[in-house]
Amino acid sequence: MRISAYAVKNYQFTLIMVLMVIALGVTTVMNMPRSEDPDLKAPNFPVIVIYPGTSPKDMEELVVKPLEKRIYGLDDIKRIRSTISDGLAVLTVEYKYSSNVDDKYQELVRETNAARSYLPQDIYKIDVQQADPSNVNILQIGLVSDNASRDKLKQAAEDLQDNLEKIKQLKNVEIVGLPSRIIRVDLQLERMAQLHIPLTYAANALQSEIANIPGGSVNQGNKSFNIKTNGNYQNIEEIKNTVVYTSNGKNIFLKDVANVYFDYTPETDITRLNGHRCVFVVAAQKTGENITQVQKAYLPVIEQFKQTLPSNIDLQLQFDQADNVNRRLGGLGEDFLIAIGLVLLTLLPLGTRASLVVMISIPLSLAIGIVLIHVLGYSLNQLSIVGLVVALGLLVDDSIVVVENIERWLREGHSRLEATLKATTQIGTAVIGCTATLIIAFMPLMFLPEASGDFIRSLPIAVISAVLASMVVSLTVVPFLASKMLKAHAHTEGNLFMRGLQKVIHGSYSKLLDKALHRPWVTIGVALVIFVASLKLMGVVGASLFPASEKPQFLIDISAPQQSSLYYTDSIAKQIEKELKQMPEVKYFATNVGKGNPRIYYNVFTQNERTDFAELFVQLDPETRTDKKLAIIEKLRKKWTPYPGAKVEVKDFEQGEPIISPVEVRLQGDNLDTLRMLAGQVEAMLIRTPGTLYTNNPVRNLKTDIRVQINKDKAQALGVPTVNIGRTVRMAIAGLNVGTFTNPDSDGDDYAIVLTTPHPSYPDLTIFDNLYVNNATGQSVPLTQLATLRLETSPLRINHHNKNRIVSVNSFVQKGYLNDRVIQSVIQQMDKMKLPAGYTYQMGGEIESRNQSFGGFGSIIMVTLFLFIAVLILEFKTFKSTLIVLSVIPLGIVGAVLALLITGNSMSFVATIGIVALAGIEVKNTILLVDFTNQLRREGMGLMEAIEQAGEIRFLPIILTTLTAIGGLLPIALSSNPLISPLAIVMIGGLISSTLLSRIVTPVVYKLMPPAIEPEKKEDEVL
C-alpha cells in the first residue's frame, strides 16, 4: 500500500511522528479531564415548594395542581412526576432529552415565577433546581467532636468552607448537619393580651425596622450622593428596644412583651461519623476538571486546616472520589502490564524481534486513541477506561496480522524491504476492512438514545479511537519497524515455538478440516444443533440491565414507624452503629438522621427531610473485593430483616439511570382510598412472589393529624377573622420569619428573626393552652373559645405522574434471583388482577428504564447491519463472500452464552456490549480467511486446495490474535468488577468457541457456496 511504502521509505519522518505521538499521548493523559462518571446534561428540573404546616391534600389542591397545569402546557415536556407530603411538594419536570438544558431551565424559572401570583402568598419557598450529575460531591469531610460547642463547630465548618471555596476547581461547598443560627423572639401572649397589643403589631414593627428603602439620589456641587433613609439593626439590643405599641404617650418596647435571644433552629437532622457527633462539609467538582489534579489542590488545604483545629475537634476526610478514580486507573495499569506479559507469551512463535515490533503498537495505539478521545470532548472516566480495556485485547490484532505476513514472506527468502512491502500490500485491504467492520460493530452504542446513550457513549468512542489508531500504526509504524528490525530466520519454518505450532496445525487441524470438507452437511448440521442449544440456554441465563457498582460502599436506609420522632429514629440508628463497629471490614459509616446522606453517587439523590427516616453511608476497606462486599450486604440483610421497631434496608449502589427499584408497579386512578386498597393487594402479591426483597407500599398506613376545628359562628360573633387564627397557630408552633439580621460583629453572618412563643424545640399539645387570637379591634380572645382540637387521618403522601394520581408499589430483588424473571412473574400476576373501571397499572423500574434506554435502538441496529454488509460487499464485491463471513457470528454466541452460564452472570447490558464487540472480532478474523482464499483462487489455485491452504496459513495469525485478545481480557474477566467482568467473560467465551468452530465451519460454508472468482494474470507489484 502507498501509505506503508511512504512510511518505510521516509523512515526519518515516521520516527519523528512516532516520538511526537508518544509525547502528545503522555501530556494528554496527564492533563485531560478525569472524573468518576461521564458528564451528563439531562433537561430534568426538580421544582421544590416548601409550605410548612400544609397537609398533602391541601398542597395538592392549592399548589401542585395549578403548577402542573401551567408547566404541562409548555413545549417539549416529556413527563412531570410530583411527590406531595406534609408542607413539601417536589415536581420533577422532565423535558425531551434533545432539549437545550439552559434554555429550558430559564423557561421553567420564568413560568414558576409567573405562577406565584395565583399561589398562596405565604408559601415559604419555591426553588427550581437543575438535576446536574456534576453536582455529585467528590469530597465528604467530617468535623468530629463529642464535646465542642455548636458555635465552635459552626466556626470550624465555615472556616473550612471558606478555604475550600477558594479552590477554583471546586463548587457547591456546603455544610451539612448544623442547625441555622436565629434570633428568637418569644412573645408573652398573656402580657400582650393584658396590654391589648395585637400580634400583628409586633410583626409589623420588626419588619418596618428591617426594611431598607432607598431614598434616591441628590446632586451637590459636582458630586452625586445616594440617600439612605433607614438601616438594619446593628445589634440584638436594638431589636429588644423596638417600639411595638404606644399607649397614653408611653412606648412599649419589644423587650417588655417578649424574650429576645440568640438560638438555633430546631434540629431537623443529626449527623455522626463512626458513631461520633460531627458536622459534614461537602464539595463538588466543576465540569471539565481533572479530578487527580483537583485532589492535588485540595489535599494540602485540608491538611493545613487540620493543623489549626483545637484539640477537641478532629477532621476526617471520609470520602474522596479521587481515590476511586486513581485506584481504577491504577488497576487499568496493572491490567495493561499483565496483558502485555500474556501478549508476549502468545507472540513467542513470531520470535523476539517480531514480538517487539508488535508490542510497540500497544502504547502507540493507546496514545493516539487517548488523544482522539480528548479531541472529541470526552473525559477519562469509568466508561472510557472500560473502553480502553476492551480495546486492549484488539490493539495488536492488526499488527500481528501484518507482522506475521511479513515474516512469512521473509521465510520464503525475500529481502526485508521487499517482504515488508509485498506483505503489507497483500494484507492491507483486509486490515482496513477488518477495522471498518469492528468500528461499525460498536456504532450502535454511540447512537443509544436518552441519558443511557450519553452515559455509555464514551465507551464506544474509546474503543473506536484505539482500534482506528491501531490500524494506522499497523500500516505505517509496523512496516517501518519491520523493515529495520526483522531478519530472516535461520530455519525456514521459523523458531522452535513456530515449528511446534505449525506441527500442531498440520497434525490436527488439517486432518479435521479435511474430514469436515468431505462431510459438509454433517458439519453444518452439528454446528446448527450447537447454536440452537445455546439459544435455549439463553432462557436459563436470563436478562438484566445494569450491574451493581463495584465500589466498596453501600447505604443502609432506616424507616422508623410512621411519624416517629427524630430522637426515636436516632435511637434505632445508634443500634445499627453499634453493630457496624463490630465489623473489621467497615472503615467509615456516616449517619444522617432525619435526612439522606449528601449526594456522593451520580444516580442517588439526597432524601428529603423526614423525622422517621435515617440513612447510613458505609464505606469498607478500599481493598475489599466486590464479592466480599456483596457477601457482607447479604449477611446484613438476613440479620436485619425483619428488625424490631423499624424497617432496615441494606442497598448497594447500582449503575445506569436512577430507578426507585428493579420491580415497580405503578397504579393509576382518581380515588385515594381505592388506590390504597389496590396498593395493598399489589403489596401482598409482591411479598408472595419468590425473589422479592424490601417490598414498599407508601400508602399502607394513613397519617394521623391534629385538626384545629374552628367554630366559625363564634369567631364571626367575636369579630375574629379565620386567617388570624391560622396565623397565630403557625406563629406559636412553627414560628414566623419576619426578616433577617446581619450581625456586623461576626463577619456579616445572617440570622433569621423568628417570631414565636415560649416553647421547647419540639412543642407538645400544651402549647395551645395559652394562645390568644386578636379580633378586628385588636382585642385578644383565648383560642380555646374559638376552636377545638380533634384527630383526623390523611394520606402520608400523594404522587402524580403527568397530572394523574398514582401509587407506586415497589420491591428489590434477592441475591440469586434474576431481575427479569421476577419482573415477568409480577407482570403475569398483574395481568390476572381485576382492576376497577378507570384504574390501570403500568410497570416502572427496570422495565421503564430499559424501554427508555433502548427506544429506537432497533432502527440503529438495522442501519448498522446494512453498513456491515455494505463494507463486506465493498471489500469482496460478492454477496456469497459476505454471507460466508457473516455466518461466523452465531458460532461466537455459543461460547458467550456458555461462559455466562458457567460464571453465573446474566445477559446484562454490559454483556450485550461484549456480544457486539465479539461479532466485530469474529468477522475481522473471518475476513482474513475468506480474503486469502479468494486471493489464492485468483492466482489460479483450485477450490479445495485454496480452502485447505488458506485455512492452514491463516490459522496461525487468527489463533495468535485470538490468544492475544484473550490474554488482554483475562485480567478483567478475573476481576470482581461487575461493570466490566461480564463483558470480558462474554468475549473470551465467544472467542474460544468461534475460533474452534469457525475455522471448520467457515471453510465448509465456503465450499458449499463458493464465490465466483476469475483467475487473473500475475502482475508486478506496484511499489
Image (tube, rainbow, N blue to C red):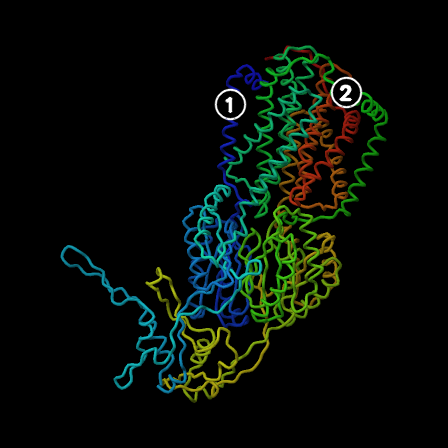
* Residue 341 place in picture, x, y as percent: 66, 29
- Frontmost residue, 891 versus 469: 469
State the residue position of label 2. Answer: 502
735 to the left or right of 943: left
Residue 17 marker: 1
Asked whether residue 487 is in view, the answer is: yes
Say what amino acid the circle numbered 2 marks.
Gln
Distance CA(mark 2)–CA(mark 1)? 37 Å
154 to the left or right of 223: right
Q: Residue drawn at (77%, 21%), measured in percent from left and top?
A: 500
Which residue sits furthest left?
Answer: 221
446 to the left or right of 253: right
SS state under label 2:
helix
- Frontmost residue, 11 versus 763: 763
Asked whether residue 909 is in view, the answer is: no
First in residue order: circle 2 vs circle 1: 1
Examine the image and state in which quarter residue 470 appears: top right
Say what amino acid the circle numbered 1 marks.
Met
Residue 71 marker: none
Looking at the image, residue 959 lies above or below residue 218: above
SS state under label 1:
helix
* Residue 615 place in picture, x, y as percent: 59, 60
- Frontmost residue, 233 versus 848: 233
Q: Could you tell me how many numbered marks the image carries? A: 2
* Residue 602 place in picture, x, y as percent: 56, 51
Q: Quadrant of the N terminus?
A: top right
Density class for disc 2 (Cα within 10 Å; few <14, some 14-19, many ≥20) is: some
Looking at the image, residue 767 lies above or below residue 117: below
310 to the left or right of 873: left
* Residue 39 place in picture, x, y as percent: 52, 45
